[in-house]
Amino acid sequence: MEKSGTRIMAVALAAVTVMTAAPAATAAASARDAALDGVWQTDGYGTIITVHGDRLRYFDTTAISCLPGVMSAEQQGAPRSFVADDGSRQMTIRLQGRQRARLRYVGAVGEIGLRRLPALPTSCSVKASAADPVRVFDVFWTTFAENYPFFAIKGVNWQAVRDRYRPRIGPKTTDAELFGVLRDILKDLGDAHTALRAGKDEFVRPLRPGTRPLDGLPAFMALNKRVLDLVEKHDGKKPLTTWGRGVIGYADLPGGFGYLRSAAFDGYADGGFAANAKELDRALDEIFTPDRTSRLKGLVLDVRLNFGGYDALGIRLASHLTGRPYAAYAKQARNDPSDPTRFTRALPIRVRPAAGSRYTGPIALLTSPLTISAGETFSQAMTARTPAPRRIGDTTQGAFSDFLWRTLPNGWTFALPNERFLTRQGTSFDITGIPPQDRIAGTLSDEELAAGRDAAFDRALAYLRTAGRSGR
């Protein structure tokens, strides 16, 4: 998701750290470092990674293309510690013998399997020709065809999309016309984890049809302020105590209840995942004190306006809300270009109780269509909690997957989802979103905000009063 202001859209790929197990000696370390050198094919993701000396590079591949990817990095600091050229995200690579490895992005959940290739495919070494608009379209369309998992769920015939739009592209198509065609395809698809960037100013990221439009960070921030004003004034709540540049907020409510709001799982501090995790830990330690958790009768947990960020920070919050370990969800990626029903092995993601004081009582979870990405993976993790929260508000956006960022022959970049998140029962809420148990029409609508009403919050308090009496 895009870094800006509160960093609510943290999709830009950046710093990379490649690590192995701690060496027993310098010679062993050098041998392991050398063992990483070579060419690695990801399981799914359509990506090849090369590690040679002090350089790491990505290549985006399809059946018709191999292009330099959005990430390249240079060794810095510890052996095989790489920092990407734009400097903001890390990953680790763990060898599993000579031919296999596992890649993990810091701040994400799950791992990506790597398989050693004997050499870089020759197509990746061929110098790209001039960016013909037709080729740009074909690479864009083919990347979706080989990686996007949700055509069937959406009822989209992707071949028909090609047949409809490709005749509009020719050798003399202008950049503006080409951008318009690709933009229209994404808007028709209506998936919040797709995006297209052409230069500094041309950017599109559609939401699910029917969602309140939020064109860029200023619109999000304006709505965020209106919602914050509402929740602070409603039901006599005093101003929230905030952390992380105001992204996290908490207030004690009358009757022994609490209200915790998270507007993102990112943007709390500069410095990447570690700095954000440190600020979240500080907030949660100050919120869930032994005194407060001992007297708290119920918690309203509000992620109705949460554009996401680091999935691992959602798991970190969930760990302060349980007294027992449990499986939050499982994550897998599409990994067969010719078969959209084929996925990698589902990797379980677990929540383990945090050290120190935790809250384990009743929770009312407030969601909306503007609960997106890591806001949704957190909500899915909470649905597996015991006792499960009462879900109140409206259906979440349905965009769980990490962004898969790719390059086009003309230098533009675009993103699509290629992963799905499964419940313990094997259900996926990708595309459909997580439905509420108590649906509140018009939650956070302009009419509700203007009238100073918050029907979802009122319903949450009513539920918690009942849950407290019943001992749930």
Image (tube, rainbow, N blue to C red):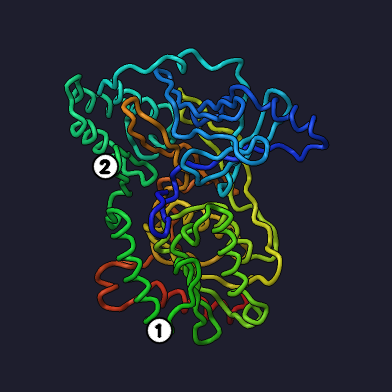
Residue 441 appears anywhere in the view = no
> Going by the image, does 442 lie left or right of 64?
left
Q: Residue at x 51, y 39 (%)?
A: 84
Q: Residue at x 45, y 51 (%)?
A: 373
Q: What crowding class fits label 1: few (fewer than 14 Cα within 10 Å), some (14-19), or many (20 or more)?
A: some
> Residue 437 in the image: x percent, y percent?
45, 63
Q: Residue at x 32, y 39 (%)?
A: 196
- Name the amino acid, label 2: Glu
Secondary structure of the residue carrying tag 1 is: helix
> Residue 402 in the image: x percent, y percent?
48, 43
Q: Is residue 44 above or below residue 127?
A: below
- Name the amino acid, label 1: Asp
Q: Marks 2 and 1, Cα distance to the nearest angstrom? A: 42 Å
Q: Nearer the viewer, residue 327 or 176?
A: 176
Q: In terms of sequence position, does the residue under pointer 2 or pointer 1 come before the other?
A: 2
> Going by the image, does 77 lie left or right of 462?
right
Q: What crowding class fits label 2: few (fewer than 14 Cα within 10 Å), some (14-19), or many (20 or more)?
A: few
Q: Quadrant of residue 351?
A: bottom right
Secondary structure of the residue carrying tag 2 is: strand
Q: Residue at x 64, y 70 (%)?
A: 360
Q: Quadrant of residue 222?
A: bottom left
Callouts 2 and 1 close, C-beta under 8 Å:
no
Circle 2 or circle 1, nearest the eye: 2
Q: Is residue 352 above or below residue 430?
A: below
> Residue 450 in the image: x percent, y percent?
25, 75
Instruction: Please give the residue where the numbered disc 2 appears in the rendered image.
Output: 202
Instruction: Please give the residue where the numbered disc 1 appears in the rendered image.
Output: 235
